[in-house]
């Protein structure tokens, strides 16, 4: 019991403590409440895994609620993308809810607060209200409209709802305490006039509730037991509780807000506003660009749901914010793909090799394992012919003894095939090697059991048959930003750190088995890394995204 208790995160400890103190397990309910004003990113993954993980742990329902109170920024496209991402991560919500479901109830409660003298209509400009707010050490100043009569407040607020006032002319404010040390308690705005069509209610409403008024009341309506927010909402908790106090029924579950730290990812940004800027400025090719930290971008790049969940579990839930190195996310992808991705051969930077003693016009089909990490993955046949492609970097005319690949007079083994020896090479007018002539040992076929096949050579190369290879567009990705924390640098815009070399597009050659690969299929290109079939692929063109390399090459580059 002690070990299990120690493994709990601090949020789980809170839930356990509540259960010990008489809270009913049947009353547990959690929620994931995104605003549909952009695509979910890796930072949201922690919140998704936390809330849905608690639901699984305690067999409690979890709502997916869209906090859709700002029609100026919210779209159905984002709602659909969020649902797709949560499902892709492997989670199922109990009920799908929207804050807009509660617009009438929130309005009725607002009328009740006005009637009780706890809310009033303020007709000042936003600038005047900001000037009256005060500072953390200086009390605010009462609005000249703070003591409007209840009757006048009710009348104007109803006119606001009926569309009789322009945007920005009036707001409804809670009447709390203009001298509170918590500036959020200084008569916060509850409603504003906004003549914008809503993605669900269309033009039915022209006043919209603010987040602080909506969020806690929505939790209460849904009977959410634990409302888990990121740390920036810690100061909002007092207001969250004040609003609940105005409507609470003691017989019902009272939601409890608790906060956990946001985890930032290095070499990227996770602000929706900044991600939108990248999209609108065409720095990236949409929200699902594989360089983006969005869940849809990670999916397109080839990350698995399991890798993202493992990443969220590994970084855990904490009370302090910190910067997580993106290489940890890449490690989680690499670890999961190693178990599941079929091994194939693809040559990214081709150099032609002619096996001069291989019979011209003939071909031989060799058997190769699909995945040595999975004994049930089986084998497949790959063709070998007289002309093959290898990587340019795998050949040197001359090299020292530490170079275990192909060099003139040296031998290597072709993966699943034969030992070849480099005899000569052909160069172009600029002195670049364009072809290597080799011979092969016909008795050295891998797995044949002959004495020659057991002969040890230090290098094994991947390759593809020129005659059978399929050309493919391959997109190689690097960090989107050159700085590990691009949006926290003083006096510098985060866009200044955009990596101009974050994408390289090349033409590669892959083995023929990949001709039937489907969008989303993931593979390990042997010795090169993990790759995924991109949605841009079609019958005429294969397109692969590089998900992650076999090793953390970025760390090596940074250490030089």
Image (cartoon, grey):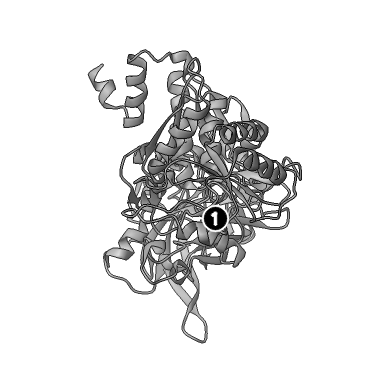
Quadrant of the image occupied by residue 474 = bottom right
Find residue 82 and report its horizontal and vertical position in percent.
60, 42
Residue at 37% across / 23% down in the picture? 15
Quadrant of the image occupied by residue 148 = top right
- Which residue, given by chain and number where applicable, does mark 1 sit on? 290
Q: Is residue 488 left or right of residue 225?
A: left
**CA neighbours of label 1 inside 10 A, class few (<14), some (14 to 19), many (20+):** many
**Residue placed furthest toward the left:** 2
Asked if residue 329 can be seen in this view, the reply is yes
In the picture, the quarter occupied by the C terminus is bottom left
Tell me if residue 69 comes above or below residue 538 in the rendering: above
Residues 457 and 69: in front is: 69
Find residue 283 and report its horizontal and vertical position in percent.
56, 66
Find residue 208 and report its horizontal and vertical position in percent.
64, 44
In the picture, the quarter occupied by the N terminus is top left
Tell me if residue 125 comes above or below residue 428 in the rendering: above
Asked if residue 34 can be seen in this view, the reply is no
């Amino acid at each position: 019991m002690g070990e299990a208790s120690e493994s709990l995160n601090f949020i789980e400890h809170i839930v356990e403590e509540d259960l010990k103190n008489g809270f009913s397990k049947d009353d547990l309910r959690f929620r994931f409440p995104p605003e549909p004003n952009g695509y979910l990113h890796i930072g949201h993954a922690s919140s998704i895994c936390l809330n849905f993980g608690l639901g699984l742990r305690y067999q409690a329902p979890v709502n997916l609620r869209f906090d859709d109170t700002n029609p100026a920024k919210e779209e159905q496209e984002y709602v659909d993308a969020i649902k797709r991402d949560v499902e892709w991560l492997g989670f199922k919500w109990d009920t799908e809810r929207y804050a807009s479901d509660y617009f009438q109830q929130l309005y009725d409660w607002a009328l009740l607060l006005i009637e009780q003298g706890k809310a009033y209509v303020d007709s000042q400009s936003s600038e005047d209200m900001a000037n009256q707010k005060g500072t953390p050490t200086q009390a605010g100043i009462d609005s000249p409209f703070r003591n409007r009569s209840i009757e006048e407040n009710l009348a104007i607020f109803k006119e606001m709802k009926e569309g009789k006032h322009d945007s920005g002319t009036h707001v409804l404010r809670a009447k709390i305490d203009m001298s509170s040390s918590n500036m959020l308690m200084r008569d916060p705005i509850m409603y504003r006039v906004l003549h914008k069509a809503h993605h669900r209610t269309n033009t039915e409403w022209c006043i919209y509730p603010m987040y602080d008024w909506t969020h806690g009341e929505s939790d209460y309506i849904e009977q959410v037991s634990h409302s888990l927010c990121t740390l920036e909402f810690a100061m909002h908790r007092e207001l969250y509780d004040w609003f609940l106090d105005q409507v609470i029924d003691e017989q019902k579950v009272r939601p409890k807000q608790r906060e956990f730290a946001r985890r930032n990812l290095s070499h990227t940004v996770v602000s929706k506003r900044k991600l939108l800027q990248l999209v609108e400025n065409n720095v990236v090719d949409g929200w699902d660009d594989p360089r983006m930290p969005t869940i849809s971008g990670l999916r397109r790049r080839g990350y698995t749901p399991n890798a993202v969940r493992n990443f969220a579990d590994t970084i855990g839930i904490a009370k302090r914010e910190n910067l997580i190195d993106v290489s940890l996310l890449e490690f989680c992808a690499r670890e999961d793909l190693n178990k599941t991705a079929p091994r194939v051969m693809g040559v990214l930077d081709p150099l032609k090799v002619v096996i001069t003693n291989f019979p011209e016009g003939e071909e031989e089909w060799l058997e190769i394992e699909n995945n040595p990490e999975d004994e049930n993955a089986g084998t497949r046949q790959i063709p070998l012919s007289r002309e093959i492609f290898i990587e340019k970097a795998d050949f040197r005319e001359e090299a020292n003894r530490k170079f275990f690949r192909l060099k003139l007079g040296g031998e290597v083994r072709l993966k699943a095939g034969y030992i070849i020896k480099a005899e000569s090479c052909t160069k172009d007018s600029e002195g670049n090697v364009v072809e290597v002539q080799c011979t092969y040992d016909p008795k050295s076929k891998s797995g044949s059991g002959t004495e020659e096949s057991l002969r040890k050579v230090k290098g094994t190369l991947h390759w593809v048959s020129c005659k059978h290879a399929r050309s493919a567009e391959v997109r190689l990705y690097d960090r989107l930003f050159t700085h590990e924390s691009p949006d926290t640098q003083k006096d510098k815009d985060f866009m200044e750190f955009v990596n101009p070399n974050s994408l390289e597009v090349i033409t590669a050659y892959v083995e023929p088995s990949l001709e039937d690969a489907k969008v989303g299929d993931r593979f390990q290109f042997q010795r090169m890394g993990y790759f995924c079939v991109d949605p841009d692929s079609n019958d005429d063109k294969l397109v692969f995204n590089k998900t992650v390399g076999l090793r953390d090459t970025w760390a090596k580059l940074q250490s030089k």
